[in-house]
Image (cartoon, rainbow, N blue to C red):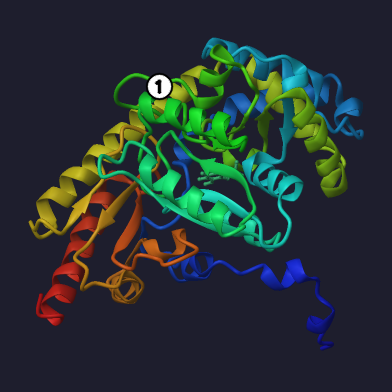
C-alpha cells in the first residue's frame, strides 16, 4: 500500500480522528446499553408522513428534484424555513438564509471562511467535539473559557481576562463558538443576561458569534429564552451573529439538512465556500422536506419529541438519584431540554478508564475528556437520554453506578 503521508497538506496533518468516535465503536455492540451516542429516539421519526411527502415529490416535480439545484437552497424549502423561524419570532429574508448539509457542514464552512493556521476560536470548556474537529482541520486552535458555577453561560470575567491575555500575546482570535440552548455535552442553557453580555462582548471586540442551535426547539421545561441571533436582530441589529439550525434533532438526522442564518454579506461568502464542497445540498431531500413542512406536521413531531425526552430525562435523573453514591463531589446536570446530561465524578476517577470497566458490565457513556482541546478534565461523562428505552435507562444507570462504586472502592476514595 503506498504511503502518501509525506504528501498530505498541513491541514490534513492537523485532522485528528476523534478518540470519542473511536471509543463509540466499542459501545456499539448489540447487547450494550449505550448512553454514548447522540442519537434521537427513532420512534419520533414520522415515517408514514415522510413517505407521503416523498411520494408527492415523485408524483409531481420529480425531474426538478433529480436535477442540480442552486447553492443557496431550494426555494420551496427556504420559504418553509422562513415561516418556521417567523413562528418563533425570528424574521429573516432569503438573503439571510443558506441551506446546508446539516449543521456539521455549516461548522466546516464557517471554519473554512475564517481560520488560518494558528488562529484561535473562543469556545466553552467543555464543548461539542464536532466543532472542535472542524476547527482543528484548518490547523486552528481553541481558547477555552470555563462556564460559571451557575452553569448559565461563560464566566464572563474569565472570558475577558483570557481574551485580553491572548490579545496581549499576539494571538489572532476569529470568532466565539457557543451552543446556548442545552449545550452538547453538558446540557447547560445560557441565561438571557449572559446571552446579552456575550453580544455586548462581540460588539466591543468585533468578533462574530457562531451560535449553534440544534437543540433549541427541544425544550421540555420552562420558557424559551431568545437566541443571541434574535437579540441582535431586535436590538442593535449589527449582524454579528451566525446562527446554525438543523432538522437533525427536530425531525430526523438522516435527512442531513440544516440552515445558516446570518447577515447577507456573510451568507454570500458562505455560498462560495460551500460551492467548492458540494455545489448544492441534496435537491430531492430539500424538496421532500418542503413538501413535509407544508403539512404543518413538524410542530406535532417537535411537541411529541419534547414530551418523550422530558419523561426519559426524568427517568435518568431519578435513577441517578437512586443508584449513584450520595457525595458532594458527585453531581450531574438536570437540563431543561436537549439530549444530554453531564455527570461530574470525584477527582480520583478517570472516566476514560472507567469506560472500559463499564463496557465489561455492558453499559456505555462518553468520557468527558474528548470535549476539551486543551487541559481536559478527566472525571466527567456525557450521558444521552433520548435513545435508550425506559427499561434500559433504569438498568443502565444501575450498572453504571455499580462501576462507579467499584472504582471508588478500588481507589480507596
Ligand atoms: C452542538 C452540535 N452542533 C452540530 C451538530 C451536528 O448536527 P447535524 O450535522 O446533524 O445537523 C451536533 C450533533 O450532535 C451538535 O450536538
Q: Is residue 312 left or right of residue 181?
A: left
Judge by depth and name the residue closer to the eye, 134 or 39: 134
Can residue 364 be seen here? The reply is yes
Query: Could you say where residue 251 lies in the image, as x and y percent from the top left?
Result: 55, 31
The residue to which callout 1 is attached is: 225
Task: Report the quarter where the C terminus lies.
Answer: bottom left
> Residue at horizontal 67%, vertical 67%?
15
**Vertical position of residue 77 compared to residue 281: above or below:** above
Locate residue 236: give its quadrant: top right
Locate residue 64: give its quadrant: top right
> Residue at horizontal 44%, vertical 44%?
160
Q: Is residue 211 left or right of residue 263?
A: left
> Residue at horizontal 43%, vertical 45%?
159
- Mark 1 residue element: loop
Q: How many marks?
A: 1
Whether the residue carrying mark 1 lies under 8 Å from ligand 1 is answered with: no
The quarter of the picture showing ligand 1: top right
**Vertical position of residue 54 compared to residue 355: above or below:** above
> Residue at horizontal 47%, vertical 34%?
215
Query: Could you say where residue 48 lies in the image, as x and y percent from the top left?
Result: 58, 28
**CA neighbours of label 1 inside 10 A, class few (<14), some (14 to 19), many (20+):** some
Query: Could you say where residue 330 lies in the image, as x and y percent from the top left?
Result: 17, 58
**Vertical position of residue 329 compared to residue 259: above or below:** below
**Vertical position of residue 76 compared to residue 10: above or below:** above
Locate residue 204: give its quadrant: top right
Can residue 184 be seen here? The reply is no
Judge by depth and name the residue closer to the eye, 226 or 353: 226
Residue reaching furthest to the front: 168
Query: Could you say where residue 359 lies in the image, as x and y percent from the top left?
Result: 34, 72
Task: Report the quarter where the N terminus lies.
Answer: bottom right
Judge by depth and name the residue closer to the eye, 249 or 29: 249
Amino acid at each position: 500500500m503506498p504511503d502518501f503521508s509525506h504528501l498530505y497538506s498541513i491541514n490534513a496533518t492537523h485532522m485528528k480522528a476523534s478518540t470519542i468516535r473511536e471509543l463509540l465503536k466499542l459501545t456499539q455492540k448489540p447487547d450494550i446499553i449505550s448512553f454514548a451516542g447522540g442519537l434521537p429516539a427513532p420512534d419520533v421519526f414520522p415515517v408514514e408522513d415522510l413517505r407521503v411527502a416523498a411520494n408527492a415529490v415523485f408524483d409531481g416535480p420529480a425531474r426538478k428534484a433529480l436535477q442540480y439545484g442552486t447553492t443557496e437552497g431550494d426555494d420551496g424549502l427556504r420559504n418553509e424555513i422562513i415561516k418556521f423561524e417567523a413562528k418563533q419570532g425570528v424574521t429573516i429574508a432569503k438573503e439571510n438564509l443558506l441551506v446546508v448539509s446539516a449543521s456539521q457542514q455549516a461548522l466546516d464552512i464557517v471554519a473554512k471562511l475564517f481560520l488560518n493556521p494558528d488562529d484561535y476560536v473562543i469556545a466553552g470548556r467543555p464543548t461539542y467535539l464536532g466543532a472542535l474537529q472542524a476547527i482543528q482541520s484548518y490547523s486552528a486552535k481553541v481558547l477555552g473559557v470555563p462556564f460559571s458555577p451557575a452553569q448559565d453561560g461563560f464566566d464572563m470575567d474569565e472570558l475577558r481576562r483570557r481574551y485580553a491575555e491572548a490579545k496581549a500575546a499576539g494571538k489572532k482570535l476569529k470568532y466565539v463558538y457557543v451552543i446556548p440552548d442545552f449545550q452538547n455535552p453538558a446540557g447547560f442553557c445560557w441565561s438571557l443576561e449572559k446571552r446579552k453580555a456575550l453580544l455586548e462582548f462581540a460588539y466591543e471586540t468585533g468578533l462574530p458569534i457562531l451560535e449553534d442551535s440544534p437543540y433549541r426547539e427541544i425544550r421540555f421545561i420552562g420558557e424559551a429564552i431568545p437566541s443571541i441571533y434574535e437579540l441582535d436582530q431586535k436590538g442593535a441589529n449589527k449582524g454579528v451573529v451566525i446562527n446554525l439550525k438543523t432538522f437533525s434533532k427536530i425531525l430526523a438526522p438522516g435527512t442531513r439538512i440544516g440552515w445558516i442564518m446570518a447577515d447577507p454579506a456573510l451568507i454570500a461568502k458562505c455560498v462560495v465556500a460551500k460551492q467548492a464542497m458540494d455545489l448544492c445540498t441534496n435537491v430531492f431531500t430539500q424538496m421532500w422536506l418542503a413538501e413535509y413542512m407544508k403539512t404543518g406536521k413538524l410542530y406535532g413531531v417537535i411537541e411529541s419529541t419534547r414530551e418523550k425526552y422530558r419523561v426519559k430525562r426524568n427517568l435518568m435523573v431519578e435513577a441517578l438519584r437512586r443508584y449513584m453514591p450520595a457525595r458532594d463531589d458527585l453531581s450531574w446536570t438536570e437540563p431543561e431540554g436537549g439530549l444530554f446530561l453531564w455527570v461530574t465524578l470525584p477527582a480520583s476517577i478517570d472516566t476514560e478508564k472507567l469506560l472500559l470497566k463499564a463496557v465489561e458490565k455492558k453499559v456505555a457513556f462518553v468520557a468527558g475528556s474528548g470535549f476539551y482541546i486543551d487541559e481536559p478534565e478527566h472525571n466527567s461523562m456525557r450521558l444521552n437520554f433520548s435513545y435508550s428505552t425506559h427499561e434500559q435507562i433504569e438498568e443502565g444507570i444501575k450498572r453504571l453506578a455499580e462501576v462507579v462504586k467499584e472504582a471508588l472502592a478500588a481507589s480507596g476514595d
